[in-house]
Amino acid sequence: MSQSEQPIRITGGCNCGALRYDFTFPPHTEIPLKDNYACLCTLCRKFTGAVVPRLLSVYTSWSNIRLYHHAPEFRMYTTHVLDGFTGHRGFCGNCGSSMGTHHDPIDNIQGFTIFLGTVDEEVLVGKVIGEEEGKYGARVMRKSGFAELLADTSKTGSIWVENATPGYDLKGPKKWRGEEDEGQWFDDIEKASNAH
């Protein structure tokens, strides 16, 4: 485990640009991150259209700009994950991009999640520094993306692995269901499914 040597700044937003975010992680953030995970619940899959949605927890205190939750284009879809546990799924009313989830009322949000697919291309895969010719034509060369850092769930793992799709390698611990403080963590999906 190490710490980031310089501040990590993550920017992103919806496809049309109406909803934007800009976060700077606190100095000396632990690497691998402890606030990212893969959610395998059916609700996240259907909301994002991804088999293995990746999320990152962020906090309002990290934000460099006004939260997108206050933009007129912001829409919410409320879901009930477990008894007594409500999730608000945010998306853009213009382009339909799924942004993330939160559990608190908008005026009281302290933290929420963003879907990693909403992170800006230059931040995720790096800035374009040139092109080179390859076997299949020109190939863009990039430098300094955070994809590996943001997608590394080796410390935090995956939740709702009862819905895991065979053939996907899920790094890190696995939780059978997504209960906050309940449930048991497992090393692999087979152990988790055999325990239930």
Image (tube, grey):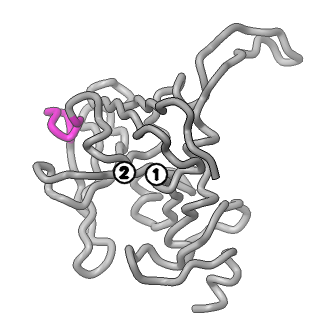
- Residue lying at the far left of the rendered structure: 107
Report the quarter where the C terminus lies: bottom right
Cβ atoms at labels 2 and 1 below 8 Å apart: yes
Question: Of the residues shown, which amino acid type is indicated by label 1?
Answer: Leu
- Tell me the SS state at disc 2: strand
Q: Nearer the viewer, residue 110 or 136?
A: 110
- Tell me the SS state at disc 1: strand
- Seen at 23% across and 35% down, the residue is 68
Q: Mark 2 points at which residue?
A: 113
| Mark 1 crowdedness (10 Å alpha carbons): few <14, some 14-19, many ≥20 | many
> Would you place residue 24 above or below residue 32 in this image?
above
- Seen at 32% across and 24% down, the residue is 17
- Seen at 49% across and 41% down, the residue is 28
Disc 2 from disc 1: Cα separation: 6 Å
Res 98 label: none
| Mark 2 crowdedness (10 Å alpha carbons): few <14, some 14-19, many ≥20 | many
Which stretch is magenta? 67-74
Q: Position of residue 100 (x, y in %)?
A: 35, 48
Looking at the image, residue 67 sits to the left or right of residue 99; the answer is left
Looking at the image, residue 78 sits to the left or right of residue 191; the answer is left
- Residue lying at the far right of the rendered structure: 135
Return the disc, 2 or 1, that comes first in the chain's sequence: 1
Question: Of the residues shown, which amino acid type is indicated by label 2?
Answer: Thr
Q: Mark 1 points at which residue?
A: 55
Looking at the image, residue 134 sits to the left or right of residue 28; the answer is right
Q: Where is residue 20 in the image (x, y as percent from the top left)?
A: 31, 29
Q: Nearer the viewer, residue 67 or 91?
A: 67
- Seen at 67% across and 60% down, the residue is 171
Q: Where is residue 55 in the image (x, y as percent from the top left)?
A: 46, 51
